[in-house]
Image: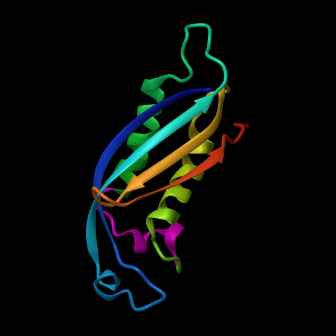
Amino acid sequence: MYAVAITRDFVAQHHLIGEDWGEETRNHYHQYKVELELQGEELDRHGYLVDIVELEAQLDAQVRYYADQTLNDLPEFAGLNPSIERFAFILCEKLSARVNTPAVNVITVKIWENDNAWASHSCAKQSST
């Protein structure tokens, strides 16, 4: 299995809902780091799993969308707790639908909310139609 990954950093805010999470129930920001990893079993005729320029463009578009936002205010988080687990799931699903590389089987998004805490989600590559 081959794997290619890229990372980006950005700042966004959120607050947790649903329980008394103390300080976490107030708006606060994180310096998020997101890693996008693609896996596949075969390389293309040039010896690549994925076009990194296209991969970077797709991740950069998502980072621009989320940067400097309050996650709770975005439609994909409406009524949901914006945990890093949920954030990783949402980003994985979005990127799976946008990355147009037939050789990729699995996409994994890992998000750190600080130097010590991260969550990830892996999803099968959605077919482009």
Q: How many marks?
A: 0
Q: Is residue 31 above or below residue 28?
A: above
Task: Determine the residue positioned at 46% across, 50% down.
Answer: 110
Image check: 49 left or right of 17? right
> What percent of the width, then of the height, locates residue 120?
50, 54
**Along the line of sight, the residue nearer the viewer: 47 or 58:** 47
> What percent of the width, then of the height, locates residue 106?
63, 39
**Along the line of sight, the residue nearer the viewer: 121 or 81:** 121
Q: Which quarter of the rendered picture does the N terminus lie within?
A: top right
Q: Is residue 73 magenta?
A: yes
Task: Determine the residue positioned at 26% across, 74% down.
Answer: 28
Please name the colour scheme applied to the rendered image: rainbow
Q: Is residue 41 magenta?
A: no
> What percent of the width, then of the height, locates residue 60?
38, 41
Q: Is residue 123 above or below residue 81?
A: above
Image check: 73 left or right of 122? left
> What percent of the width, then of the height, locates residue 51?
50, 22
Task: Determine the residue positioned at 29% across, 48% down.
Answer: 9
User: What's drawn in magenta, residue-wise?
Assistant: 67-78
User: Which of the 4 image quarters holds residue 59?
Assistant: top left
Image check: 10 left or right of 74? left
